[in-house]
Image (cartoon, rainbow, N blue to C red):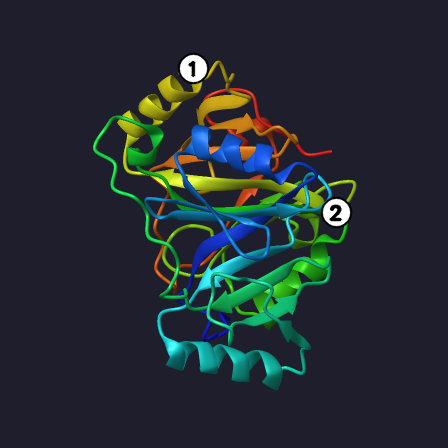
Amino acid sequence: MTLESPIWPSQLDHLRLNSDDPAMLADFYATTFGFHQTSLADDTYLLQGPGRRLIVGAGAPGERPYHGYRVQNRRQLEDVRDFIQGLGLNTEPSPSTIFEPDAVAVRDPDGWLSVFGLPRGDLPSQKPNNTPSAVKLSGKLQHVVVATNNLTPMMQFYEDVLGYVASDFCSADVDDPDTKQVAFYRSDPEHHSFAVFSASEVRSDHHAYEVDSWNDIRDWADHMSSLQIKLWWGPGRHGPGNNLFFMILDPHGNQVEISAELENMPREMAARVWPLEERSLNLWGPGWIRD
């Protein structure tokens, strides 16, 4: 039975990436993924593009300190706060400098921080751009994925506590619910805004940008080629979500995905189960099986 959580609907608005050389990483994302770059007062970089935002700051390479989810209005934000606190969960001050100060933050069993809030209205505007560039390519920030050696508590937290809606699972044995290895969760009708893969350790996995069509996949791949950046995985089509994709690696080895045609699922649609095999992860070719 789906928990009627006030977190629905919310969308992934931004996340923070850390680096021991944040200026380098910010320049990479600005050039590679089409962001306008602004230095903020707290020594972080705000990256903004069409439907996509990132914060880059100082820290250990590969760290992802928080994921920021945008709610629809202040009434929903207060409902989310009351809901989370009513569950007895500890909330934390929001670390996001681009959400309003009253955003609410909560940690999952692996320590990942989810922040629910409303965007500030006084941030620097994106500059107009009338010349061909990656800044003009579609690609809204759409989902974030983590790996865990603690899958069952993570699934229980997102599904049974926060009330994200399960879309798909991958299982070693599709007839045995205790063999789940992957879980995809949605916080609005798009197939997943968050997913968790079983692995040998807790770590970041990837984040993704959703484009408008297959032609945009082509244009992004051509753009990567112009920068002499090789595709790390794909092009292909995932089984869960049915989306077209390719991935590249950023300078710290973070996987970043360009996706198209991600499935939409109404809130009441039940989750499905896929076998954990290469073909489920890529209907067209080799799959990425996490260790």
For mark 1, what is the residue? 225
Answer few, some or many: residues within 10 Å of disc 2's Cα (few below 14, many 20 plus, some between 14 and 19): some
For the residue marked with disc 2, what is the amino acid?
A: Val
Displayed quadrant of residue 112: bottom right
* Secondary structure of the residue carrying numbered label 2: loop
Task: Check if mark 2's residue and mark 1's residue have beta carbons within 8 Å.
Answer: no
Percent position of residue 17, x then y? 60, 45
For the residue marked with disc 1, what is the amino acid?
A: Ser
* Quadrant that contains the C terminus: top right
- Return the residue found at the far front: 41
Residue at image location 37% in from the left, 54% down from the top? 124
Task: Out of 56 and 284, give the one closest to the viewer.
Answer: 56
Residue at image location 60% in from the left, 64% down from the top? 95
Percent position of residue 238, x then y? 46, 33
Q: Is residue 266 visible?
A: yes
Percent position of residue 100, x then y? 46, 70
For mark 2, what is the residue? 202
Answer few, some or many: residues within 10 Å of disc 1's Cα (few below 14, many 20 plus, some between 14 and 19): few
Displayed quadrant of residue 127: top left
Report the disc number at residue 104. Answer: none
Relative to 160, does residue 17 appear above or below in the rendering?
above
Residue at image location 31% in from the left, 27% down from the top? 133
Q: Between marks 2 and 1, how big is the CA–CA gap?
A: 32 Å
